[in-house]
Image (tube, rainbow, N blue to C red):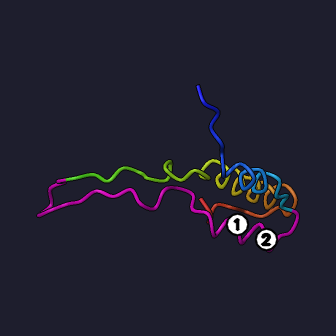
Amino acid sequence: MPHQIDFLQPLRYWINRIEVQDRKLAHFFSKLIPAHCPFERDINFFGRKIAHIPPLCKLNPLYDELIALRFRALCYLVDQCGEDIQSYC
């Protein structure tokens, strides 16, 4: 089996190494990265569901890293700043 090259590995590594140690940065990441996939939709016609568009976020090759970054930002806001993060959920 040929060895596959992961061109996104340096970017994944960089995102995973971001340490959230600033309140403004934590708020920025929490607002920037959505809590759930914004693309999932039901298509209705005259009150009847005719189609469903599944969440496409999993197709993003950096999805897991971005969700982990958002989680680190929210944890920082709760643990270090003592903030209520309910508005981000």
Quadrant in which the C terminus is drawn: bottom right
* Nearer to me, 17 or 89: 17
- Residue ID at (64%, 52%): 67
- Judged left or right of residue 56, residue 89 is right
Task: Give the number of the disc on residue 25.
Answer: 2
Rendering coords of residue 11 (x, y %): 72, 56
Rendering coords of residue 1 (x, y %): 58, 25
> Mark 1 — residue?
29
Q: Considering the numbered disc 2 on the image, is that residue within a helix, a strand or a loop?
A: helix
Rendering coords of residue 35 (x, y %): 57, 57
Tell whether label 1 touches label 2 (CB within 8 Å).
Answer: yes
Tell which residue pokes out farthest to the left in this image. 46
Among the 4 quarters of the image, the one containing residue 2: top right
| Magenta stretch: includes residue 43 | yes
Task: Give the number of the disc on residue 74.
Answer: none
The magenta-colored residue range is 21-50
Residue neighbourhood size for the residue with mark 1, other residues' Cα within 10 Å, grouped as few (<14), some (14–19), many (≥20): some
| Magenta stretch: includes residue 41 | yes
Above or below: residue 39 compared with residue 16:
below
Q: Considering the numbered disc 1 on the image, is that residue within a helix, a strand or a loop?
A: helix
Residue type at mark 1? Answer: Phe
Tell which residue pokes out farthest to the front in this image. 2
- Residue ID at (64%, 69%): 31
- Judged left or right of residue 83, residue 40 is left
Q: CA distance from mark 2 to mark 1?
A: 6 Å
Residue neighbourhood size for the residue with mark 2, other residues' Cα within 10 Å, grouped as few (<14), some (14–19), many (≥20): few
* Nearer to me, 30 or 17: 17
Above or below: residue 24 compared with residue 33:
below
- Residue ID at (65%, 42%): 5
Residue type at mark 2? Answer: Leu
